[in-house]
Amino acid sequence: MQDNPMTAPASFDVALRAAQARITDYAHSRLTGADDLHAAMRYAMVGGKMLRGFLVLESGRLHGLAPDAAMNAALAIECVHAYSLVHDDLPCMDDDDMRRGQPTVHRKWDDAMAVLAGDSLQTFAFELMAEPVVGPHALAALRTLAQSAGKDGMVSGQMLDIAAESAETPLNLDQITRLQQRKTGCLIEWSATAGAVLTGADPAPLATYARALGLAFQIADDILDVEGDMNKVGKALRKDEDAGKATFVSLLGLDAAKKRASDLVEEACEALHPYGDDAETLKQAARFVISRDN
Amino acid sequence: MQDNPMTAPASFDVALRAAQARITDYAHSRLTGADDLHAAMRYAMVGGKMLRGFLVLESGRLHGLAPDAAMNAALAIECVHAYSLVHDDLPCMDDDDMRRGQPTVHRKWDDAMAVLAGDSLQTFAFELMAEPVVGPHALAALRTLAQSAGKDGMVSGQMLDIAAESAETPLNLDQITRLQQRKTGCLIEWSATAGAVLTGADPAPLATYARALGLAFQIADDILDVEGDMNKVGKALRKDEDAGKATFVSLLGLDAAKKRASDLVEEACEALHPYGDDAETLKQAARFVISRDN
């Protein structure tokens, strides 16, 4: 087993689990408050795959980013992701009772706690990015994090998603691709390029990788929603179909959706060419997103 | 009338209105999106006193901070304040229908929009602070903004406030002072010290000023809740008394609360001694917070 995933490529499976453990430990070491707010923040961070944080650590390793800087950025992106899930699960949004195999924050506590825990997870993400350990390019990375997460990024994607539910005609492929790019693609791209941005290197190859990966990830999510086992996925499934929502599966058909996801993974892997063998773990990550069962 | 409040002290009344107009114009110039999310964000920014933004501009003027840097910081703090009001007004929190004389965001749109508009206002605040125009001390100011707004600052104050509502015994004076310091004091202190922090100057005198001002402001709010005219204040009053909540008025009595607020204003003004006549507008601001009727 690879002891330190910052120093050499490891097999994806090992690297993802190591990243998850290290980010979770760091989250717990930074969120030590004894009050319910801190407890809810810690709770919301538990059990995620932490693919975004893993991408930050891997892109950091590829560019020789200091491990402490990479860890702050990895926890920051996982806090943004966790905040968005806590708010999306609220009764006034997607109204979900289960997340990552456990009751959602508003079911475990109440709606007010979910609003506030989500709010403070977002704030904490920016606090982490503003700490001196992140280094001389912190402000540039922080700015793109805000752009990726906010009114023209993730939140606008969530808005488009809500609007689509009450629209008279289902979204077409262009519209759903744009929705996905905003709702999940922006933050996946930020994660995969963080190591380049934080070392002042060219983020273009990793951005190309991330755009293909992000789209493949969403198509795989739609496939899981149709084919998945709720006990493994850890949340309610078949909601899109029940709601009559357009998905990549409903628009393309199941087989064509799988083919498209597979083609995107190849595109993602080709974009990593400049990194040679060092990028093997990221290539495995791309293959993982379309083969996962949760 | 003072044309440019950045270059010389103006009377408080003129300076506050000028700051409010300039910050509102800047908010509209930055939030131009045609979608409902941007509309809700603009709506949430309208009609506030913008005392926090005014404090940023004034402390910036005292320290010779570039006007564009001050304006980004002023809009940032008003976005944080607006986000906190939009979320606090939600049915699962304070459940208020009116704010600043108009329907709250969740009444005008719905709860989901209020969650998302609040979320993206917070994100936008950090985006503004991360823009190059803010200058070489941006990261330090951004970090203290996150600390002041988050799990150990404003959000924890809101948590304490919610917990107090269901507590068996009302808060005592120490507890309510701590709650106020977190819920509103932290961001007032950040605002008043922003000009010093963003120019690398000593923020201590302005911090002392702000701590006294923030406490006086909250005491004045409690007095307004008892004595105010809802048509002027623009939101529901007498809620604290009806809920049996401890306030500075219930703990000190009305006359002693007024005396305490007045003493704090004198303390605030004395702290401004190092700035001489340049701080006249900030002194007037301190006197305003205990004489306002809204």
Image (cartoon, coloured by chain):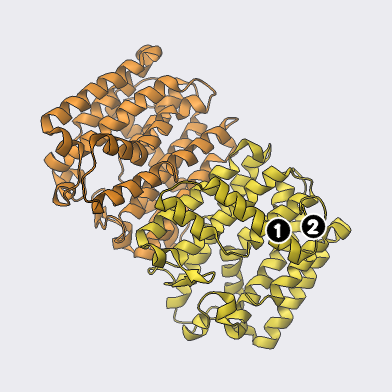
Chain colours: A orange, B yellow
Residue nearer the viewer, A23 or B31: B31
Residue A73 horizontal/vertical position (percent) = 47, 36
Residue A6 can be seen, yes or no: no
- Give neighbour class at mark 2: few <14, some 14-19, many 20+ (Cα, 10 Å): few
What chain letter is assigned to the residue under label 2? Answer: B
Residue nearer the viewer, B239 or B12: B12
The amino acid type of the residue labelled 2 equals Gln
User: In the rendered image, which quarter is residue A232 located in?
Assistant: top left
In the shown orientation, is residue A208 left or right of residue B235?
A: left
Q: Are marks 1 and 2 in contact (CB under 8 Å)?
A: yes
Residue B139 horizontal/vertical position (percent) = 62, 40
Q: Quadrant of the N terminus of chain B?
A: bottom right
In the picture shown, does residue A49 fall above or below B58? above
Q: Secondary structure at mark 2?
A: loop
Residue B202 horizontal/vertical position (percent) = 77, 49
In the picture shown, does residue B86 fall above or below A71? below
Residue nearer the viewer, B158 or B53: B53
Q: Residue farthest to the right?
A: B276
What chain letter is assigned to the residue under label 1? Answer: B
Mark-to-mark CA distance, 1 and 2: 8 Å
Res B2 label: 2
Residue B142 can be seen, yes or no: yes
Name the residue: 59% across, 56% down: B78
Of the image marks 1 and 2, the number of the one nearer the N terminus: 2
Residue on which the image places disc 1: B18
The amino acid type of the residue labelled 1 equals Ala
Q: Secondary structure at mark 1?
A: helix
